[in-house]
Image (tube, coloured by chain):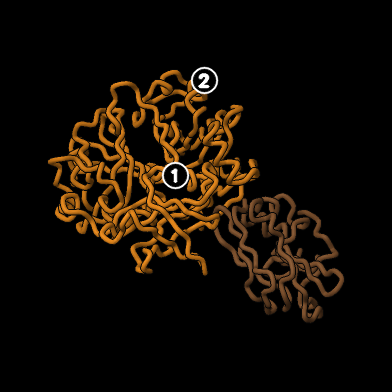
Chain colours: A brown, B orange
């Protein structure tokens, strides 16, 4: 099992979230999630400027097999999306923690307290 | 309780991700992933464990005649060692299963779908007379070796099987192990299917996998390969409510053969047309259009639904098969698939998406 980065927070729906300055939360999917999905062939990113609620569905990752929804870990506004993934979704398979999907400017960073730390997420995926 | 094939431990050793399929724990993909496996099979050769499929023997002088009355094809002229792909139909003309029949000296050997085997074997049992002897075979594993390098690989083990034409079978020895090998498959590529006793299954599998050109392929890539080849998957393009004409399998029907269940409806559809017909769809988007998506015309009227859809690894864009109402499809007008909140333009296109590369010897009629 790969070591999970401990500077990230983890959602039970398998997104990771990284807090940066100015209430920006960078979001990707975990290595466990990309491994489960298999080769990604399409990623639908949220629109810039979209307001999302916490746990609102806002992106879709599609593998050869299936389409899977992604959820925003916090409420806020979508302020950046990783457009490079439109033509190269496999970047997520290659490096799940080094490849972000979108950034949210969070209304309230304390919502991230509801997410798991690396140890708790590790426990969850081992079950 | 999920069943395991004789290669279960080998699959784990090869790094397979196992998942339940038709009552078996089967390899979905190996370490390099579905896209790699798919492309490897198209460019070199892929090894598939398909031992979950059902195998049976129907023996006796009446086997050909009695099975012949349950299928839409005419197998009376089949010679020992020749194979026929066909379908069993119900009295409404729907497809009970699609099967591969091999004529052997003592009768017929039949391969059926894994998910259908209990149903089909009960059906055989109740429809065959005492003059046929029905035997389910459980002691043999079934593998496929598919791809442009498959013939060269098989030739190293048996010159005889490399000489087979598409849809022919023979007994052969692979490294001294008795096998039954046929030239067919489910990928659109040239290739072989190999029956071998369970006791020797792993030995034969390792021999094939040791070849440089050969890599193991999981069921996920088997599905995208057959989708590109425009081949039907039971439970998707075909089921008990879909007739062979609707499924685009009218080529299985033989003139003057009309003694099979549902013949009235099927032959009428052949003459007057069916209310739905299987088509290929090219998708004008990066977004895969998947099974269950509704297809609409430009006025927003539903004209059918997608039966299988995925990203095509060979083509690099999504493709799908669908059952459409032929009377509302005007090929000059665009069609649309609804995926989430996207209306995606799709175009009806001839199947297969990727050309078949079956090996037919000169003079052999297409099977």
Which residue lies at the image location 60% right of the left edge and 41% below the top edge?
B36
For residue B96, say whether it is visible: no
Residue B82: x and y in percent read: 30, 30
- Asked which secondary structure carries label 2, the reply is helix
Packing grade of label 2 (10 A; few <14, some 14-19, many >=20) is few
Q: Which disc is residue B335 wearing?
A: none
Q: Is residue B326 left or right of residue B201?
A: left
For the C terminus of chain A, the quadrant is: bottom right
What residue occupies the far top of the structure in this picture? B159
Task: Give percent across and percent down for residue B158.
Answer: 46, 20
The residue tagged 1 is B226
Q: Earlier in the sequence, mark 2 or mark 1?
A: 2
The residue to which callout 2 is attached is: B156
Measured from the top left, where is residue B84 in percent x and y? 29, 37
Q: Residue at x 43, y 34 (%)?
A: B193
Q: Indicate the secondary structure of the residue bearing disc 1.
A: helix
Q: Chain of mark 1?
A: B
């Amino acid at each position: 099992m790969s070591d999970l980065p401990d500077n990230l927070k983890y959602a039970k729906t398998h997104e990771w979230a990284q807090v940066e300055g100015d209430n920006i939360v960078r979001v990707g999917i975990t290595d466990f999630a990309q491994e489960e999905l298999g080769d990604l062939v399409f990623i639908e990113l949220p629109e810039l400027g979209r307001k999302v609620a916490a746990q609102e569905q806002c992106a879709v990752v599609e593998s050869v097999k299936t389409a899977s929804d992604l959820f925003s870990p916090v409420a806020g506004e979508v302020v950046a999306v990783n457009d490079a993934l439109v033509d190269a979704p496999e970047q997520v398979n290659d490096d799940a923690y080094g490849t972000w999907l979108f950034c949210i400017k969070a209304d309230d960073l304390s919502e991230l307290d509801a997410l798991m730390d690396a140890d708790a997420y590790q426990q969850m995926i081992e079950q | 309780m999920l069943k395991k094939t004789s290669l279960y431990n080998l699959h784990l050793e090869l790094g397979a991700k196992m998942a339940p399929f038709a009552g078996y724990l089967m390899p979905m993909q190996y370490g390099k992933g579905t896209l790699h496996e798919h492309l490897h099979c198209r460019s070199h050769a892929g090894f598939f464990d398909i031992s979950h499929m059902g195998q049976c023997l129907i023996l006796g002088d009446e086997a050909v005649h009695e099975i012949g009355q349950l299928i839409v094809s005419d197998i009376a002229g089949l010679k020992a060692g020749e194979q026929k792909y066909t379908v069993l139909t119900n009295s409404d003309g729907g497809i009970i299963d699609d099967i591969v029949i091999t004529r052997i000296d003592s009768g017929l050997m039949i391969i059926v779908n894994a998910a259908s085997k209990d149903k089909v074997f009960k059906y055989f049992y109740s429809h065959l007379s005492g003059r046929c002897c029905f035997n389910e075979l459980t002691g043999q594993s079934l593998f496929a070796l598919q791809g442009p390098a498959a013939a060269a690989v098989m030739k190293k083990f048996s010159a005889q099987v490399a000489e087979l034409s598409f849809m022919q079978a023979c007994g052969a020895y692979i490294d001294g192990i008795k096998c039954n090998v046929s030239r067919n498959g489910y990928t659109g590529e040239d290739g072989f299917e190999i029956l071998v006793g369970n006791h020797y299954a792993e030995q034969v599998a390792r021999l094939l996998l040791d070849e440089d050109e050969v890599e193991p392929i999981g069921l996920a890539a088997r599905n995208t390969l057959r989708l590109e080849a425009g081949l039907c998957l039971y439970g998707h393009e075909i089921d008990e409510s879909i007739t062979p004409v609707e499924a685009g399998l009218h080529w299985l029907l033989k003139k003057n053969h009309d003694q099979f269940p549902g013949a009235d409806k099927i032959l009428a559809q052949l003459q007057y047309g069916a209310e739905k017909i299987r088509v290929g769809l090219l998708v004008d988007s990066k977004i895969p259009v998947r099974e269950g998506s509704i297809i609409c015309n430009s006025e927003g009227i539903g004209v059918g639904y997608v039966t299988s859809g995925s990203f095509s690894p060979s083509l690099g864009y999504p493709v799908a098969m669908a059952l459409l109402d032929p009377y509302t499809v005007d090929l000059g007008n665009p069609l649309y698939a609804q995926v989430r909140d996207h209306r995606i333009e799709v175009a009806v296109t001839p199947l297969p998406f990727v050309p078949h590369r079956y090996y037919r010897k000169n003079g052999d009629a297409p099977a």
